[in-house]
Image (spheres, grey):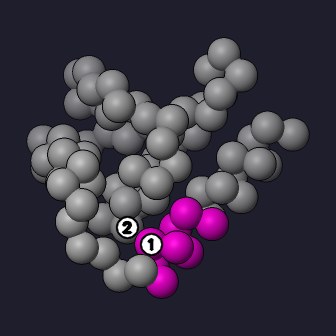
Amino acid sequence: MKAEKGIISTTDVYQAAYLAMKKHEPKLTKQEGRIVFEFSGPEELKLLAKNYLTNSSVKVLDYAGQVKRLRAATVKLRK
């Protein structure tokens, strides 16, 4: 995860899904052949990104749905 000027960038689809569950939609970009999820928002976003690393609880079906949705978006972007 990279954070600068209110933007958090990650290639981790699982972290991206966690942040998306918390109502922060990523912008998907292609950088050097990899898909990068970019999030911009308030300071709360940095705290949520850190919470992901503490193994915080989530609704499993909602989380799985977000992972599937983001994976589909990455496949579409690669074409």
| Amino acid type assigned to the residue bearing label 1 in the image | Tyr
For the residue pair 16 and 39, the one nearer the viewer reads as: 16
Q: Residue furthest top?
A: 32
Q: Earlier in the sequence, mark 2 or mark 1?
A: 2
Q: Position of residue 70 (x, y in %)?
A: 60, 57
The CA distance from mark 2 to mark 1 is 7 Å
Above or below 54: residue 38: above
Judged left or right of residue 46, residue 68 is right
Residue 58 colored magenta? no
- Tell me the quadrant of the picture where the N terminus can be found: top left
* Residue 42 in view (yes/no): no
Look at 19% across and 46% down and name the residue there: 50
Judged left or right of residue 44, residue 53 is right
Q: Position of residue 72 (x, y in %)?
A: 71, 58
Q: Is label 2 in contact with label 1 (beta carbons under 8 Å)?
A: yes
Look at 44% across and 72% down and name the residue there: 63
Look at 48% across and 42% down and name the residue there: 12
Please give the residue where the numbered disc 2 appears in the rendered image: 21
* Image mark for residue 63: 1
Find residue 29 and report its image quarter.
Answer: top right
Above or below 66: residue 30: above
Judged left or right of residue 67, residue 72 is right
- Tell me the quadrant of the picture where the C terminus can be found: top right
Circle 1 sits in a helix, a strand or a loop, which is it?
A: helix
Above or below 57: residue 20: above
Give the extent of the magenta segment: 61-68
Q: Position of residue 20 (x, y in %)?
A: 40, 60
For the residue pair 7 and 53, the one nearer the viewer reads as: 53
